[in-house]
Amino acid sequence: MRIAEFRITRFQFARDRVIGDSQVRADSANVAALELVDDKGRVGLGFIQTLFHPLPSQAEIARVFEDEVWPGLVGQPPIGLVHRVNRPRGGNQRAFSLPFHEALQVALWDLAAKQVGLPLHQLLGSRRNRVRAYASGLDYHLSDAAFEALFAHADSLGYTAFKIKVGAPDFDRDLHRLQILAKTVRPGAQFMIDANEAWGAKEAAVKLTAIRKAGYDLLWVEDPILRHDFEGLKLLRDACPWTLINSGEYLDAAGKRALMLAGGTDILNVHGQVTDVMRIGWLAAEMGIPVTLGNTFLEMGVHMACALPEVEWLEYSFQNFDHLVDAPIEISDGWIIAPDRPGHGLVLSETARREWARPNILARADLGPAPFNPRLSPAAPMAAAG
């Protein structure tokens, strides 16, 4: 049960809408599938992703992976690698040349779970198989009409909590978006906002107070200020006790630990690095700090969400990646349901490999139409705001 080979398949395609926040925007998807194959032919799948720039050619990705990563994998048992604690000293503490880190953790855990015949969430120690999802639009660059259509569609699917992007230079625009959301979704819905570090600490306190005075109760505000401003985050926790501070998204595991020890967040935001998430999630549980799963590729974060005791929510953003796998993770009436198949339950689609693989870099103008996204209403206007 040892790793014997790897495969990399590069994809590049147009997104079905412009996604982004007050700091960034993206209109194309740049992804590569990493498959680790053991000596019995079992496959562990992870995805390499860059948000704003194309990945190198498939041949170059494979060359870098073979040079930097493969010597530490070949012939090794996946279950041993996922639990290995490395000694972070000197040159051993460095990033890969390409963003392999999350894909590698996901693929190794997928393969390890398949080798013991368990769904990943059960291997991680889950006591449940579903978690509540909130609808997140990645909506900053959408027109008002597209914004309204997206959240109306989410509401119709049974979501009861909604997160929008804020942080516009004109604060009236943020208030206007909250007004649209409030009139679009069901009464009693829960609202979250995400500023993506657009504000300073005192500025955030003033704007959160104005939002409350305008009649909007927020479950949380996400990344309101700079990630390392622990003192400012603590100030916000004290100044705005009517809402929760959700932070940690942009920090690595060591940074998340420092954030919690500094008392800088009410909720810890984690993503898709399975080993890192479980380790920091255990610490959060020890400290009684709730954890929320931000966007994870194809929602595979449901496995960690089901396994950690402090998780109530997982983010879902209607991104068009479902065509890459045979059976996407099920979402029903505002709940994301962990597959009961061995591993994380996602298998790379051979149709996608045949029809959507792009071994070489294409210009944005040559990508053609976006793949169909069955989870979005086809009638919803998804034009950018201009």
Image: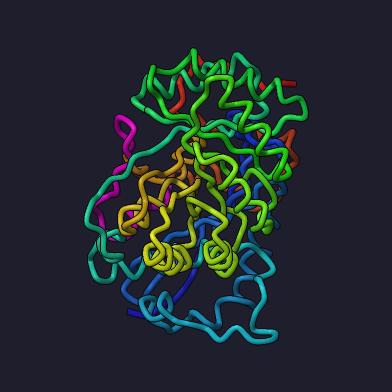
User: Which residue appears at 54% of the width and 59% of the height?
Assistant: 263
Task: Measuring from the top left, give residue 72's x and y in whole percent.
Answer: 53, 82
Q: Which residues are magenta?
A: 331-350
Image quadrant where one finds the C terminus: top right
Q: Is residue 62 above or below residue 316?
A: below
Please state which of residues 112 and 280 is positioned toward the viewer in this rendering: 280
Q: Is residue 59 above or below residue 267?
A: below
Q: Is residue 235 left or right of residue 152?
A: right
Task: Measuring from the top left, give residue 341's x and y in whole percent.
Answer: 25, 54
Q: Is residue 27 above or below residue 103?
A: above
User: Which residue appears at 35% of the width and 43% of the height?
Assistant: 329
Q: Main secondary structure of the magenta part?
A: loop
User: Which residue appears at 51% of the width and 22% of the height?
Assistant: 150
Task: Measuring from the top left, give residue 278's x and y in whole percent.
Answer: 41, 65
Q: Is residue 199 left or right of residue 71?
A: right
Task: Measuring from the top left, give residue 28's x and y in whole percent.
Answer: 65, 38
Q: Does the image show residue 217?
A: yes
Based on the displayed image, in which of its 4 quarters is residue 337 positioned?
top left
Please state which of residues 93 and 230 is positioned toward the viewer in this rendering: 230
User: Which residue appears at 56% of the width and 26% of the height?
Assistant: 212
